[in-house]
Amino acid sequence: MGFLLRCVFLWAMLQRSYMQIAVPATEFNCCEGDILLLLDSSGSVANYEFSRLLLFAAELLRPFSLGRGHVRVGLLQVGTNPNLEFGLDVHNNQESLQRALRSVSQLQGDTNTEVALSVAQRLLTETEEKVPKILLWLTDGVQPGDVDKPMSELKEQGVSVLAVSTVHGNYQVLQRAVTPPLESHLYSVDIDNIEIITEDLKEAIIKIIRAERLRVVHLTSHSAVLQWRPVLSAGSGYYDFRYNTVEKTSRESRRVLPDTSSWVELTNLQPDTSYTASLRPESNQRLFNTLSVNFTTLPDVLSPAVVSVSASGPHQIHVSWGPLQPARVQRYTVEYGAIPAGHVRMVTLHSQQNSTLLTGLEPGTQYLVTVTALHVNGKERAMSVKACTPEAALPALADLQLTPVGHQEVHVAWQAHQEGLKGYWLSWERENSRSSSSKPSISSTYLPSSSRSTRLTHLAPSSRVCVSPIYSSGRGDGICCNAERHSDSNRWG
């Protein structure tokens, strides 16, 4: 009785399928890619289960536009020997595909999935067409064999592997076989409820092979680059491309592009403006859908939009700006002066220059730098920044000489640059009189700028003597010498 009910149910499902074929569903031109059905047709699959899998595949594929430039479908059966029921280029319309799926007969025999996968690999990778490729494995999950290696090779070659299993077995094998994510690419379902996964699996397939034929790949305030996946073969026709503002504020522009085209660049667009563009492939071989896209150009950018400065020394500053717009700018002027009330100087530069070096500046001074662009339309745009020059390097001590004049005494003499000099800072190691074993202490003193020498006493053995010039803006580099105590020493320097 149960078998009879199943037969009646299957007959009803087949009748429903035939009725749906008589009234085709709306096909949508969303996708482009290859789908190869790998159908388990071995003896482990019941005839009823096999028929339900075919009905499931027919419903799953019904909405897609078929043929080159759209979706190509092939069917490979798994048995003792693989059987290619039909290749990827056989069916160019739904009526043909649905009729072929209704006429498929089960192979029976062993489940030799490994050999079938070698055929699948050749079918999906031998073509040079760079379109997404899917292997949809429909199986009862019973002992598919060692499929890990061929499945890995398919995935390495860019094929997306999806699987539907009607038996909850060998789940780990199926997990390793499919391409992530598992939640949308692997389904285990009872054959009587298989229709509940149709929409989810369809969405997963669409996500992989969706063809965004006409899309904006680069956009500026005055230009746009549009790209599409070519659908015309060489010598078969042309592309009719048109664009205009959404508000129709100007006359529609039209271009006829050769059949080898896959992109177009639009120039002289208005900034911050919405446009609509359409692409109609024209061919005497078949009818293609018109593709369209809307986009909005970026707001206008007038130079200078950014100005940067960097100190190149105490007397100069490097200034640069952008963007460089030689076709829209007549000339640039750079004005600079010390803050708050320094003399303002100006440099005029041609439109192809976006940097300059400002020289003759004072060290340790803050400057206001203003870059102004005179545009060809008579408008001016200016941008100002502040910049500081670093302090000038302080002169170092010119010379240092140490001359012994007695036991633990030394005469120290030096030379230094006099401009801005305030004095000298001396430091030396002094012998500690409290204990002969204790470490020497550090002594220091400040001498006026008129000093050129001094005498140091009670120096520790091998005392290190340092002298540094002091200027109004800081300390310059000093010199250090060791005062070695030898009976025959005359001078150290």
Image (tube, rainbow, N blue to C red):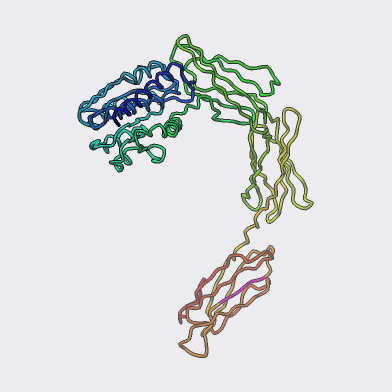
Where on the picture, by quarter, is residue 21? top left
In the rendered image, residue 425 lying in the magenta stretch gets the answer yes
**Residue 1 shown left or right of residue 463 in the figure:** left
Near-viewer residue (161 or 94): 94
Residue 316 appearing in the image: yes
Residue, x 59% and y 22% (percent of image)?
277
Q: Is residue 357 above or below residue 63?
A: below
Where on the picture, by quarter, is residue 4? top left
Residue, x 51% and y 72% (percent of image)?
481
The kind of secondary structure the magenta stretch mainly shows is strand
Q: Quadrant of the N terminus?
A: top left
In the image, farthest residue toward the top = 284
Residue 36 pos. (x, y %): 34, 26
Near-viewer residue (136 or 170): 170
Residue, x 48% and y 86% (percent of image)?
438
Near-viewer residue (453 or 186): 186
Residue, x 52% and y 23% (percent of image)?
263
**Residue 124 shown left or right of residue 273 in the figure:** left
In the image, farthest residue toward the bottom = 434
Where on the picture, by quarter, is residue 100? top left
Near-viewer residue (334 or 188): 188
Residue 229 pos. (x, y %): 47, 23
Residue 113 pos. (x, y %): 25, 32
In the rendered image, residue 396 lying in the magenta stretch gets the answer no
In the image, farthest residue toward the front = 1
Q: Which residues are magenta?
A: 423-427
